[in-house]
Image (cartoon, rainbow, N blue to C red):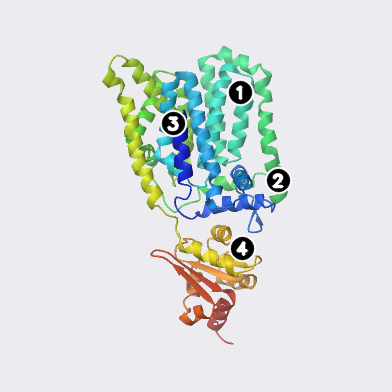
């Protein structure tokens, strides 16, 4: 297990600065973590947040407290640590069932999956969620064999997963299917488990973990399930694009490489449906529920189903074991899975290396330069209006208001702001903001009414609110 852990650690920590500045969602998590670390509560720019689950912001706050630094790099430390935890979980369960070599292959493959490696350097919830979701599944797998404390571990990991992404509710149908499978496999053992105190007492640990957050949600918004309800409508109403039903199947090759997909899908299918290995069946059920649920939506994105990656890595472990056991006397044939793992690693290095070197967040680096200027040129109580509010708040360390939807509301909010931020890269920027900068003259920059920051692709314009207000007044028809 050591080599995959070293690989993940080196790749993750070395590339914490990949992609440049934080994107919108990353900036929200970082801002929540900074607010928690500074004792300001669960809020972004003075506005209490009732949408983001708490585990990742709390982890970011812990990283800030441990390092004494509040930077992009330190904010991403928990992601790498959760990535290491995912590797450990896969290695542990596969070694427990099939031995060290299949366990090494499973752990190595998860570390080498390009989708896993690229998510490892983003301050998003996918990697923590996959680690906790897999840990919950593997704990229940052991619990149905041994009972006792493993039910507590399963429910605890489920609660932590639900505190990371509301998608963890998919564990419900997964657990039902697993329970039915166990009934078919060995009904007598299941009945013994049902008569134990542990299986009925274990959900209490999940309630203890989740209760403070949902109590807080009720106090803040009057609805304990406000975040769950928002998440339930987010993807169904997100209609910027529609993908075919086979999108996730076609994405398997770039997400895992061709060699990795062959080992993972082939191994999981063989292990569950032909060899009928219990662990492979559990993994297949979990992966099918995750991918199948998200397939029903028109909008699809690979990051939404990354929780299936540890399950697919289990398939790699079984593929290696089944193949090497069958062809143990044929050296060359026996080495084919190893050659596929090496090929997968080479393909992953090429894919993720390009991502680390060339992929950059929209607005990098001129937007960061603009916010650095704001941080040095304004007082702590200064206020901005920006179309990308979370990023502006994170990098300027100033109060930031989102750009209103209408010009009328914008005119009213100008009285609260000192500067207005206009970009050429934020897709949600209202059209009137671009119009506001059309009257800008070179003299205005010399007089300090405006500052322009640009690179070869992106541009950020800072306008003093007084100047914008004067432009709006001058454009209004006189009575």
Q: Distance between the residues labelled 3 and 4?
A: 43 Å
Callout 1 touching callout 3 (CB < 8 Å): no
Residue, disc 2: 216
Residue, disc 1: 150
Q: Which comes before the other along the chain, label 3 or label 4?
A: 3
Classify mark 1: helix, strand or loop: helix
Q: Which comes before the other along the chain, label 1 or label 2?
A: 1
**Residue 398's mark?**
4
Residue, disc 3: 3
Would you say 261 lies left or right of 26 here?
left
Q: Position of residue 268 (x, y in %)?
A: 41, 26
Would you say 334 lies left or right of 296 here?
left
Q: Which comes before the other along the chain, label 3 or label 2?
A: 3
Q: Which comes before the other along the chain, label 4 or label 2?
A: 2
Q: What residue do we see at 53% from left, 42% from top?
A: 79
Classify mark 2: helix, strand or loop: helix
Callout 3 touching callout 2 (CB < 8 Å): no
Please determine whether, in this image, residue 46 is positioned above or below residue 351: below
Q: How far apart are marks 4 and 2 (CA)?
A: 26 Å
Disc 4 crowd, CA 10 A, few/some/many (<14, 14-19, 20+): many
Q: Where is residue 264 in the image (x, y as percent from the top left)?
A: 39, 30
Q: Distance between the residues labelled 3 and 2?
A: 42 Å
Q: Nearer the viewer, residue 416 or 50?
A: 416
Q: How far apart are marks 1 and 4 (CA)?
A: 46 Å
């Amino acid at each position: 297990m050591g080599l995959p852990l070293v690989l993940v650690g080196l790749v993750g920590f070395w590339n914490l600065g990949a992609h440049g500045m934080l994107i919108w969602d990353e900036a929200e998590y970082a801002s929540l973590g900074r607010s928690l670390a500074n004792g300001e509560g669960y809020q972004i720019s003075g506005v209490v947040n009732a949408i983001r689950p708490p585990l990742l912001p709390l982890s970011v706050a812990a990283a800030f407290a441990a390092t004494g630094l509040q930077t992009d790099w330190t904010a991403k430390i928990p992601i790498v640590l959760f990535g290491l935890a995912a590797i450990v979980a896969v290695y542990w369960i596969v070694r427990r069932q099939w031995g060290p070599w299949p366990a090494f292959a499973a752990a190595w493959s998860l570390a080498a999956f390009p989708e896993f490696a690229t998510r490892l350097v983003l301050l998003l919830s996918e990697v923590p969620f996959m680690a906790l979701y897999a840990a919950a599944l593997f704990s229940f797998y052991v619990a149905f064999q041994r009972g006792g404390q493993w039910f507590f571990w399963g429910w605890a990991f489920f609660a932590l997963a639900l505190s990371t992404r509301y998608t963890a509710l998919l564990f419900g149908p997964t657990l039902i299917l697993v329970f039915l499978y166990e009934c078919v496999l060995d009904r007598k053992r299941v009945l013994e488990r049902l008569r134990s105190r542990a299986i009925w007492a274990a959900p209490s640990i999940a309630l203890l973990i989740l209760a403070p957050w949902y109590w807080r949600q009720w106090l803040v918004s009057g609805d304990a399930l406000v975040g769950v309800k928002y998440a339930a409508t987010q993807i169904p109403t997100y209609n910027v694009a529609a993908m075919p039903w086979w999108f996730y199947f076609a994405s398997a090759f770039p997400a895992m490489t061709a060699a990795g997909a062959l080992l993972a899908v082939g191994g999981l299918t063989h292990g569950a449906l032909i060899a009928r290995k219990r662990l492979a069946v559990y993994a297949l059920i979990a992966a099918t529920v995750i991918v199948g649920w998200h397939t029903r939506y028109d909008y699809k994105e690979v990051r939404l189903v990354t929780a299936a990656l540890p399950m697919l890595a289990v398939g790699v472990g079984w593929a290696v074991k089944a193949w090497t056991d069958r062809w143990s006397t044929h050296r060359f044939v026996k080495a084919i899975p190893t050659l596929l793992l090496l090929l997968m690693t080479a393909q992953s290095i090429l894919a993720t290396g390009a991502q680390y070197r060339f992929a950059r967040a929209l607005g990098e680096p001129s937007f960061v330069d603009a916010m650095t200027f704001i941080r040095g040129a304004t007082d702590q109580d200064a206020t901005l209006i920006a179309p990308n509010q979370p990023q502006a708040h994170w990098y300027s360390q100033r109060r930031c208001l989102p750009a209103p939807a209408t010009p009328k509301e914008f005119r009213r909010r100008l009285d609260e702001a000192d500067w207005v931020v206009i970009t050429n890269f934020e897709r949600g920027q209202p059209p009137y903001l671009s119009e506001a900068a059309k009257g800008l003259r070179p003299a205005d920059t010399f007089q300090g009414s405006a500052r322009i920051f640009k690179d070869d692709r992106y541009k950020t314009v800072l306008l003093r609110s007084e100047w914008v207000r004067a432009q709006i007044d001058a454009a209004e028809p006189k009575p």
